[in-house]
């Protein structure tokens, strides 16, 4: 059979580009990737049949350059463009330009994108179509006094939203009248800088609501169906973290009503293709239209898992003019699916995005019921330019408890070393008692913050055994052995000293905690002495990162990843980052820390106060780094001299980037 398109271009990157490529390949469609300089060697490029460079890393110079993307489509002979999500996926002008160039935009008509792109206009239209709305104001009068009157009419708390908003940005909840003016001004500033449009709308701020959305599909022949709901209530900062389908506790008649309302919304804008109608649901179960996303969503995979359908295939077929493959009554929900978004971010620092190299990446094994969508491989970089998502983990079970158990197992198999992730946070979240009981709403994470973000348990004897063995094993540490020579931990020239009875002291720093282990050689193994216990390791075996230690009455297994003096230990459901503590090198470390000043997080340099050659006092401000809309001042660690400034004003820097070379003045350095 002839494929629906001979060749398509995928105007995106990362996991969604890889995911679209996979379906296209299965359908016999050739694929063209586009990439920025940051992505030249990335997975989505490697998977595609052809690839075009479209510019420097910054999205505005690459993935948002519709002109370059169209050029790539034309010169490669692609007849359709799939925009994925984000970037140009909801850009009506781009969809129009595709049309003019004779290239099929895999998405709805530009008019539908435009109609739904403005939340205020969309709500006006939905109101007319009879779709229920949250009480609020979404008209054109933007005078602060008038808006305040409206807020009082609606009744506090109210939510101020950017009319052009998305991604949880440009939104502010206001509890009291007195805070309204300041919140309005802040919301406007954010909206104007993020979306170039400062118009806002007001909504009643619902108490402990749920976010339930309906996946819809329409074709060009009048066919319009929904693929049930997804519950995306588990959010942080108004952004989804866990998504599932079906929504726990959803009654069949409510499902029908919500599905009907979503179809009403679709028909009102002449929708074609895949879309999602988002509803906010109050505690009594009443639902209200929030917005419609006119594209494929990140969480579409949970719908695929419970319906057994490939939504990208549907998108491509409909874009090619085919009818919907199924009618409403053919659709069934089978089992329960949950998705977790695995991010490079630090939950304990307000979910600050992280960047850096994925030194070691082990993904859970995939099966019919476990799916991992990712755009990265071990060794790849998470850069500051794009969303810090590492992967989406999607699982299915015959029911919700079975899906949850599978999610727990899959999370325990996940291993990431080299940068901070939300894996530990997700691990706790999926075991949170209210989440497990399906008693949740959009404030769950906030409410359980202290448990979800509590410090992790310290490394126990098992983890320390593995860490110690990785340090004692000469082969691991890359030391050449002469033929016939037995590895001897005693011959290492690393500053570790054996005392009279041949014992070696190993000290591991884990955050604020320090663990000491004393090791003595015993035949093929070791005797390890911990704070108040000792154990015999009779033998051990190592295979790449996997390490198995046999004790007298048990076996300890895990993975160990070493990076300089850093040791990361993974055991099912546990992850520890340890630093080899070397008393001899300690001073050196302090000195070099003072020598280069590094960016504590990814951000933008917004002020530089010093130049090479300047002398500064301890704590003098040297530069300001802006990250996550907050300013961080980098100060002189001691009295000294600026040797070199290694960053430029306006530069975007990654975590750990060297910013300033600093020389401590003679007297202080000697002290
Ligand atoms: P975005 O375009 O950023 O996705 P949405 O309008 O979809 O913005 O809202 C994002 C999230 O904000 C919702 O999923 C929900 O958690 C919260 N939210 C939105 N509207 C309300 C409301 N009226 N009351 C309470 N929470 C809301
Ligand atoms: P963190 O490890 O982030 O400090 P926790 O100790 O709460 O947070 O993590 C609980 C569990 O989450 C770990 O024991 C492990 O199962 C998993 N986990 C955390 N980080 C990682 C990671 N980088 N790779 C694999 N699993 C991880
Ligand atoms: Mg939304």
Image: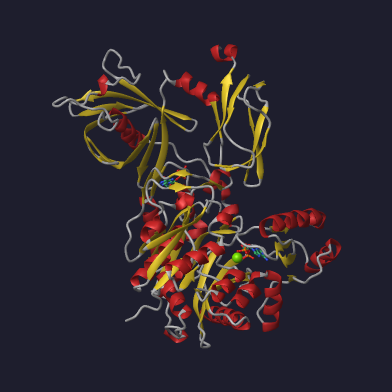
Q: Is residue 74 above or below residue 554?
A: below
**Which quarter of the figure is the C terminus placed in?**
top right
Outermost residue toward the front? 75
Label total for image: 0
Q: How is the image coloured?
A: secondary structure
Left or right: 620 in relation to 669: right
**What percent of the width, then of the height, locates residue 84?**
49, 66
**What percent of the width, then of the height, locates residue 2?**
34, 80
Residue 612 position by quadrant = top right
Residue at point 64%, 42% (across, down): 650
Residue 263 visible to an observer of this rendering: yes
Left or right: 90 in relation to 586: right
**Which quarter of the figure is the N terminus placed in?**
bottom left
Outermost residue toward the left? 484
In front of the other: 387 or 79: 79
**What percent of the width, then of the height, locates residue 192?**
72, 57
Residue 621 position by quadrant = top right
Residue at point 81%, 65% (across, down): 142
**What percent of the width, then of the height, locates residue 271?**
57, 80
In front of the other: 269 or 461: 269
Residue 288 visible to an observer of this rendering: no
Left or right: 525 in relation to 148: left
Q: Is residue 413 above or below residue 441?
A: above
Which quadrant of the render holds ligand 2? top left
Outermost residue toward the right? 145
In front of the other: 224 or 74: 74
Residue 264 position by quadrant = bottom right
């Amino acid at each position: 059979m002839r494929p629906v398109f001979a060749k398509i271009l995928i105007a995106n990157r990362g996991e969604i580009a890889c995911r679209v490529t996979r379906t296209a390949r299965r359908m016999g469609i050739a694929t063209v990737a586009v990439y920025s300089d940051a992505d030249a060697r990335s997975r989505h490029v490697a998977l595609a049949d052809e690839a075009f460079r479209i510019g420097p890393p910054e999205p505005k110079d690459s993935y948002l350059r519709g002109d370059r993307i169209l050029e790539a489509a034309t010169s490669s002979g692609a007849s359709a463009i799939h925009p994925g999500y984000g970037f140009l996926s909801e850009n009506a002008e781009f969809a129009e330009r595709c049309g003019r160039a004779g290239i099929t935009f895999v998405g709805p008509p530009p008019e539908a994108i435009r109609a739904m792109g403005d939340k205020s206009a969309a709500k006006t239209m939905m109101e007319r179509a009879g779709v229920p709305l949250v009480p609020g104001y979404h008209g054109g009068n933007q005078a602060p006094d008038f808006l305040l009157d409206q807020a009082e009419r609606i009744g506090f708390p109210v939510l101020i939203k950017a009319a052009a908003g998305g991604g949880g940005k440009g939104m502010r909840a206001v509890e009291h009248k007195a805070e309204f003016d300041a919140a309005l001004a802040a919301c406007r500033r954010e909206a104007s800088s993020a979306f170039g449009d400062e118009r806002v709308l007001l909504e009643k701020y619902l108490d402990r609501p749920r976010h339930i959305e309906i996946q819809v599909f329409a074709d060009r022949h009048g066919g319009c169906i929904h693929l049930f709901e997804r519950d995306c209530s588990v959010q942080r900062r108004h952004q989804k973290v866990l998504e599932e389908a079906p929504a726990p506790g959803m009654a069949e008649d409510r499902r029908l009503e919500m599905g009907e309302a979503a179809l009403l919304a679709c028909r009102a804008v002449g929708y074609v293709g895949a879309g999602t109608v988002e509803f906010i649901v109050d505690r009594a179960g009443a639902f209200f239209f929030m917005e419609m996303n006119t594209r494929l969503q990140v969480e579409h995979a949970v719908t695929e898992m419970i319906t057994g359908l490939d939504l990208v295939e549907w998108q491509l077929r409909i874009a090619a003019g085919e009818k919907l493959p199924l009618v409403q009554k053919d659709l069934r929900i089978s089992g329960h699916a949950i998705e977790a978004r695995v991010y490079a971010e630090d939950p304990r620092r307000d979910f600050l995005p992280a960047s850096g190299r994925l030194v070691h990446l082990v993904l859970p094994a995939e099966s019919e019921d476990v799916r991992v969508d990712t755009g990265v491989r071990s060794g790849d970089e998470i850069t500051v330019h794009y969303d810090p998502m590492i992967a989406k983990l999607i699982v299915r079970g015959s029911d919700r408890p079975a899906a949850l158990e599978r999610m727990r197992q899959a999370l325990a198999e996940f291993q990431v070393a080299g940068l901070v992730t939300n894996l530990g946070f997700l691990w706790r979240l999926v075991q949170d008692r209210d989440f497990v009981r399906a008693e949740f709403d959009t404030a769950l994470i906030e409410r359980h913050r202290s448990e979800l973000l509590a410090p992790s348990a310290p490394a126990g004897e098992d983890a320390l055994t593995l860490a110690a063995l990785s340090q004692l094993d000469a082969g691991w540490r890359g030391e050449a052995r002469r033929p016939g020579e037995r590895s001897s931990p005693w011959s290492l020239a690393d500053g570790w000293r054996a005392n009279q009875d041949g014992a070696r002291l190993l000290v591991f720093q884990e955050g604020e905690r320090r663990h000491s282990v004393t090791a003595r050689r015993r035949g093929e193994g070791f005797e390890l002495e911990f704070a108040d216990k000792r154990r015999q390791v009779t033998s051990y075996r190592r295979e790449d990162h996997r390490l198995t230690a046999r004790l007298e009455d048990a076996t300890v297994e895990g993975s160990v990843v070493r990076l300089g003096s850093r040791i990361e230990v993974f055991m099912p459901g546990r992850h520890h980052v340890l630093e080899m503590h070397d008393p001899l090198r300690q001073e050196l470390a302090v000195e070099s820390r003072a020598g280069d000043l590094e960016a504590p997080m990814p951000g933008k340099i917004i002020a530089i106060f010093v130049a090479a050659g300047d002398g500064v006092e301890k704590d003098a401000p040297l530069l300001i780094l802006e990250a996550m809309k907050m300013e961080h001042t980098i100060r002189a660690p001691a009295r000294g001299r600026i040797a070199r400034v290694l960053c430029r004003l306006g530069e975007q820097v990654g975590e750990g980037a060297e910013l300033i070379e600093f020389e401590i003045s003679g007297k202080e350095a000697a002290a």
